[in-house]
Image (spheres, rainbow, N blue to C red):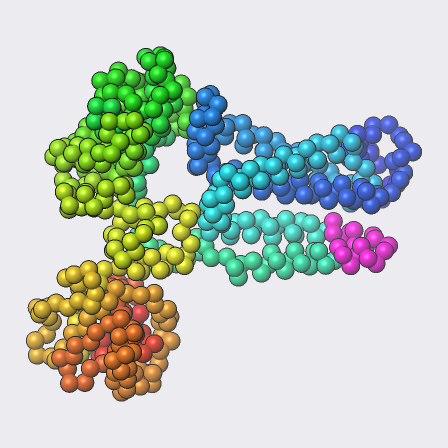
């Protein structure tokens, strides 16, 4: 065995024995590292990166893993929290490949051959095959989770970049040692190109990283309101009154649930088409445990316990942390009706949004389940504004009978001319371009009043634009000539950063005065009704209500105008630089 003056012979032999499993002197030990050995080293590096990537995927998707648990439960009929199996297994693979890779690097620094034992070769091959099959299954069955991973990089990319830079720095020594030790030009050039390519990719990566973790504190948007999906399923049995109360304790604003209609027309809370996951139906009605949830009457549903399963088969780890009193409360949960939920939600000042499941074809209320549910909502006596109507079925009937119910729309709608105020969208399935197009298109029309040195924006009286108010706001100075601008819903604006518009451009814009003709104005989707003898530029005018962060003392609301491709803030008499 070759010996290196930089390594203790005993230490070098120990490393070689752990890596190759040769504990006795053997003639094979004197053999140099072959091309086949280097190929196995490449497989080892691939197994390390693959296992590390799968561990990251598992940690990121941990919040959605309950969907995987429910998916397998519906097919196998047995409950298991697979996070307790998959994450430890992947962690073992990461640890194993990391130790083996570390041994290989130390052996190389000690000038020892990299003769990997056949047992390690088999385990590494099995590791790569299993992890590759896992990724293929994720691609086939849960393709939407890749969007979750891309979204997670907005938060983790800066820290992953730091880790990659540290790893590259630590690898510089072994790479340099291999470069100067190699006698052949081809491997040296290949190794150098690979290292330089990796270094360029890592050190230029910040140019492509856009993370909300890296911004000024003053630029942080307002904290969003929380919606409890099936309530608070980590702290209470899902879709129960206890889950509703836990949702309120967590500071959420909306309780999201699922509603079905019983065989005798009572809307009740249930997510699954079968009752066996979240109730004790197998012990109360053993012959009907596999039946549809809507095939049970309300009297039969009231006999079921909807909380014991939460402690026996906890879907999340939070169930084990409940106090004795909370565990007893969870055990006593029953299947609530929609009316009970609405009355309790009104007391807790929570809004309610629900998915409505259509009953099976042979159900009594298969065609009238929407009317039945709406009757329950109206008879509950709660304010209509607290019930967010999500189902697409029978929406016209709902709007006719209960016009004050806020309508929540999905992302894809056949009627795109309708102006929804609330959207129910999966957070992974909304590309940034679609966010700009959809959300900005849904902004309410604005009416802008402008006077010399003073502008103000107010919501339009009608949703359809252009629209104007009959009289100017009373708080504007009466001794100034004013402009009345009727503005369509704001389109996507590519506003210039603050300070990029100079005085000459502003003066040119105001001097040109409405260079656009009527066709251009029509194309811009707006109407200008001047009350001033010299109306301002009207080409591509749009307005968004805009609270200026640089001047918190400015009396809101203020506006951001788009004049001939330039941004003017605060009016004609303003300096245009405080945006």
User: What is the x, y in percent for residue 100?
Assistant: 71, 36
Instruction: Tell me what residue is drawn at x 14 percent, y 32 percent.
Output: 380
Q: Tell me if 321 is positioned left or right of 525 in this view.
A: right
Q: In the picture shown, does residue 429 fall above or below 360?
A: below
Estimate the x, y position of residue 419 in percent, counting from the top left: 25, 55
> Measuring 65% from the left and 40% from the top, which residue is drawn there?
48
Q: Residue 301 sits in which quadrant?
A: top left
Give the magenta-colored segment's residue range.
174-191
Q: Across the whole image, how many numbered discs are drawn on residues?
A: 0
Rendered position, 142 above or below 419: above
The image quarter containing residue 34 is: top right
Q: Is residue 45 left or right of residue 318?
A: right
Question: Which residue occupies 28% across, 43% down?
Answer: 392
Instruction: Name the one closer to the observer, 402 or 447.
Output: 402
Q: Is residue 142 left or right of residue 324?
A: right
- The quadrant the N terminus occupies is top right
Residue 126: % across, % down: 68, 33
Magenta: main secondary structure equals helix
Was residue 508 drawn as part of the magenta stretch in this picture? no
Task: Indicate whether 315 appears above or below 464.
Answer: above
Quarter residue 238 falls in: top left
């Amino acid at each position: 065995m070759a010996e290196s003056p930089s390594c203790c012979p005993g230490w070098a032999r120990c490393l070689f024995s752990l890596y190759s499993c040769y504990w006795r002197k053997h003639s094979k030990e004197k053999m140099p590292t072959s091309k086949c050995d280097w190929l196995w080293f490449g497989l080892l590096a691939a197994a390390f990166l693959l296992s590390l990537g799968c561990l990251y995927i598992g940690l990121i998707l941990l919040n959605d893993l309950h969907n995987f648990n429910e998916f397998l439960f519906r097919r196998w009929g047995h409950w298991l929290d697979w996070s307790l199996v998959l994450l430890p297994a992947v962690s073992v693979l990461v640890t194993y490949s990391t130790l083996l890779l570390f041994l290989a690097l130390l052996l190389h620094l000690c000038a020892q051959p990299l003769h990997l034992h056949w047992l390690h070769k088999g385990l590494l091959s099995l590791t790569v095959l299993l992890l590759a099959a896992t990724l293929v299954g994720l691609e086939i069955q849960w393709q939407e989770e890749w969007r979750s991973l891309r979204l997670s990089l907005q938060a983790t990319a800066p820290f992953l970049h730091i880790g990659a830079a540290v790893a590259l720095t630590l690898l510089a020594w072994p790479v340099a040692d291999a470069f100067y030790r190699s006698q052949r030009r081809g491997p040296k050039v290949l190794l150098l190109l690979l290292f330089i390519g990796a270094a360029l990719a890592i050190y230029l990566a910040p140019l492509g990283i856009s993370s909300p973790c890296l911004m000024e504190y003053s630029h942080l948007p307002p904290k969003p309101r929380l919606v409890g999906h099936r309530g608070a399923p980590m702290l209470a049995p899902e879709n129960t009154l206890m889950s509703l109360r836990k949702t309120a304790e967590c500071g959420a604003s909306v309780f999201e649930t699922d509603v079905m209609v019983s065989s005798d027309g009572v809307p009740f809370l249930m997510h699954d088409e079968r009752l066996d996951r979240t109730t004790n139906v197998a012990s109360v009605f053993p012959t009907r445990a596999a039946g549809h949830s809507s095939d049970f009457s309300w009297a039969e549903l009231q006999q079921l316990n909807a909380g014991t399963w939460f402690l026996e088969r906890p879907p999340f780890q939070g169930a084990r942390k409940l106090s004795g009193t909370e565990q007893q409360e969870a055990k006593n949960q029953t299947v609530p009706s929609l009316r009970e939920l609405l009355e309790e939600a009104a007391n807790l000042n929570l809004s309610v949004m629900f998915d409505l499941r259509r009953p099976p074809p042979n159900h009594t209320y298969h065609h009238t389940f929407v009317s039945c549910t709406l009757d329950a909502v109206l008879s509950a006596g709660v304010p209509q504004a607290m019930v967010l109507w999500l189902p697409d079925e029978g929406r016209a009937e709902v709007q006719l009978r209960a016009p004050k119910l806020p309508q929540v729309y999905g992302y894809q709608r056949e009627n795109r001319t309708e102006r929804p105020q609330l959207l129910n969208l999966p957070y992974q399935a909304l590309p940034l371009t679609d966010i700009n197009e959809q959300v900005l298109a849904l902004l309410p029309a604005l009416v802008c009043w402008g006077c010399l040195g003073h502008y103000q924006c107010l919501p339009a009286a009608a949703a359809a634009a252009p629209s104007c108010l009959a009289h100017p706001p009373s708080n504007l100075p009466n001794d100034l000539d004013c402009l009345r601008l009727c503005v369509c819903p704001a389109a996507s604006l590519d506003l210039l950063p603050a300070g990029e518009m100079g005085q000459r451009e502003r003066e040119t814009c105001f001097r040109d005065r409405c260079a656009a003709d009527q066709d251009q104005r029509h194309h811009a989707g707006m109407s200008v009704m001047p009350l001033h003898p010299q109306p301002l530029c009207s080409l591509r005018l749009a307005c968004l209500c805009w609270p200026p962060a640089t001047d918190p003392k400015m009396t809101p609301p203020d506006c951001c105008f788009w004049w001939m491709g330039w941004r003017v803030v605060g009016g004609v008499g303003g300096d245009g630089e405080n945006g």
